Amino acid sequence: MVILCAALEARADADKVASLFTLNCRADGFFLERHVKLDPVATPTAGVFIAGCCEGPRDIPDTVAQAEATAAKALSLISKGTITLEAAIANVDETRCQGCGRCEEICTFHAPKVISKNGVMVSELNEILCKGCGACAVVCPTGAMSIRHYKPEQILSQVGALTEV
C-alpha cells in the first residue's frame, strides 16, 4: 500500500505574514502552532489563531474541524470583552537603558523596540507582545531590562532558601 500526501507548498509571502503577526514557521514555510497536542490552533501571539492548510497539507474534514476550533477560541475571547495579559513581563528602566538594541535583536516576540525619546535612544516595550520569557533581561548589559516579579534579589533568596534545606 502506498499513501501519498497532497503536493502543497507554503505561500511565497508566508514569511511576511509570519513577521506581521509574530508567528513561527517550519523549514518548509508553513506556520507552527503553539503546541501540537495541547493547543493546535493557537499561536504564540494572543488572539491569533491558525487553521487548515497554512499549517501544512490537510484534508477537508481536518480543515473544517480546525476552523471550528479556531472559531470557538476566537468567540471565547470576544465574549469576555478583554484579554488578560501576563503579569510577569519585561520592564524597562529608561534611566539605565543605553539603547543598544540587544533586547530588540533577541526577542522572538518583537516586544522591545529602540526609539528616540527626547533625543536619547531607549528601549520601549510593547506589553501586549511580551510573554515574559526573560531573554531581553539576560542580554541587557546595564540591567535596565528586568522581568516584573522576578528581581535578581528575589531569585537569589529563593535559591538560598532551597540550599538551606
Image (cartoon, grey):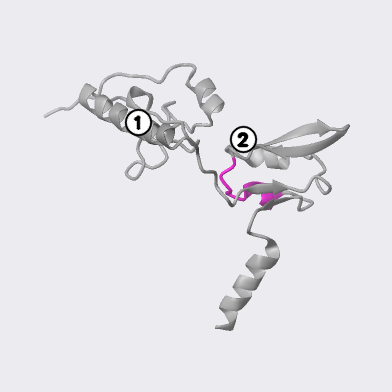
Image position of 12 (left or right of 153): left
Residue at x 55% of width, y 47% of height: 86
Check disc 2 and report the residue beneath it. Answer: 110
Could you give the CA–CA distance between mark 2 and mark 1, rounded to whole angstroms?
24 Å
- Residue 78's disc is none
User: Considering only vertical position in the picture, is 140 above or below 154?
Assistant: above
Q: Provide the residue span drawn in magenta.
A: 130-139
Q: Is residue 34 magenta?
A: no
User: Considering only vertical position in the picture, is 158 above or below 111?
Assistant: below
Residue at x 44% of width, y 36% of height: 43
Image position of 18 (left or right of 148): left
The N terminus - image quarter: top left
Residue 14 rendering spot, x and y as whole percentages: 47, 21
- Residue 70's disc is 1
Residue 62 rendering spot, x and y as whole percentages: 24, 28
- For badge 1, the amino acid type reads Thr
Foreground of the two, 158 or 7: 158
Circle nearer the N terminus (2, 1): 1
